[in-house]
């Protein structure tokens, strides 16, 4: 139960976790973002810290964290990439729970945009760096974990991400129509390289976070 004493099965592990949806500026008062609440990533940070890990949470979200979690606030995908990359060499595990925007405005305005004509407004977007793919390519000793939030073809899409991004674990997460984002419960399936999908029972994000770390600790033991 949530009140059971925690074993320090992640003691000595340096873990970097990202959480929340990135915010990509259009102008000083407007941005593009998504529905990610940061709850799952924050739960993973708290659970890892409770299990004895040294945890750095790089986050766009404002969720409650345990005092021993070191929180770095970021907004954009680029800021998140810089923050993660500077901590990568020293990390044992990196877990990308953030919903990183795939694109950002190519030229954010430094003043509040004025309304355009009735013909509409087009904003040019450029692609953001894929942080997880970069980590998967660059890893030496690190264990790299990603998420796949999907509205359809969950396991097939998640399996492709596991392979393409060279992750050591991909957590497949159905989203949309009340599922996933901002909910307190979650239903996930763990995809490990060269193994059958491992579905976990639906549970609170807090309970799932504990289960996920226990499983990671087992495969790394
Ligand atoms: N991710 C990332 N950097 C990005 C986009 C995604 O690090 N620019 C990470 C996410 O944090 C997540 C994983 O990659 O751990 C999968 O994100 P997702 O959006 O599901 O996959 P994409 O590769 O962006 O593909 P698509 O959005 O087209 O499904
Ligand atoms: Ca994406």
Image (spheres, grey):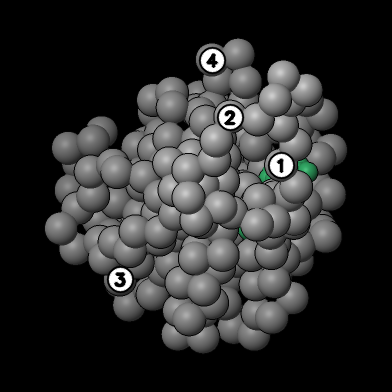
**Comes first in the chain, label 1 or label 2:** 2
Q: Earlier in the sequence, mark 2 or mark 4?
A: 2
User: Relative to the observer, which residue lies in front, 85 or 206?
Assistant: 85
**Element at label 1:** loop
- In primary-sequence order, the first of circles 4 and 3 is 3
The part of the image, by quadrant, that contains residue 151 is: top right
- How many labels, in total? 4
- Residue at the image point whose x is 30% and y is 71% from the top: 54
Q: Position of residue 189 (x, y in %)?
A: 64, 37
Q: Nearer the viewer, mark 1 or mark 3?
A: 1
Pointer 3 with pointer 2, Cβ within 8 A: no
Q: Which residue is mark 2?
A: 115
Residue 196 visible to an observer of this rendering: no
Kindly identify which residue carries mark 1.
Answer: 123
Reply above or below: 105 against 135: above
Q: Nearer the viewer, mark 4 or mark 3?
A: 4
* Tag of residue 54: 3
């Amino acid at each position: 139960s949530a009140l059971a004493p925690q074993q320090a099965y992640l003691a000595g592990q340096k873990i970097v976790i990202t959480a929340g949806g990135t915010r990509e500026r259009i102008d000083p008062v407007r941005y593009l973002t998504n529905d990610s609440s940061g709850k799952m990533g924050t739960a993973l940070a708290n659970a890892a810290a409770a299990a004895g890990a040294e945890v750095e949470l790089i986050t766009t979200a404002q969720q409650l964290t345990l005092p021993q979690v070191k929180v770095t606030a970021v907004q954009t995908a680029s800021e998140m990439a810089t923050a993660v990359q500077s901590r990568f060499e020293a990390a044992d595990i990196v877990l990308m729970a953030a919903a990183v925007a795939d694109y950002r405005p190519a030229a954010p305005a430094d003043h509040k945009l004025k309304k355009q004509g009735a013909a509409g407004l087009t904003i040019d977007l450029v692609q953001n760096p894929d942080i997880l793919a970069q980590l998967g390519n660059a890893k030496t000793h690190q264990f790299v974990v990603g998420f796949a939030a999907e509205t359809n073809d969950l396991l097939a899409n998640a399996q492709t991400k596991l392979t393409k991004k060279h992750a050591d674990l991909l957590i497949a997460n159905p989203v949309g129509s009340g599922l996933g984002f901002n909910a307190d419960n979650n239903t996930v399936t763990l995809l490990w390289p060269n193994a059958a999908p491992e579905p976990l029972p639906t549970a609170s994000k807090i309970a799932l976070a504990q289960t996920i770390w226990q499983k990671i600790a087992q495969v790394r033991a």
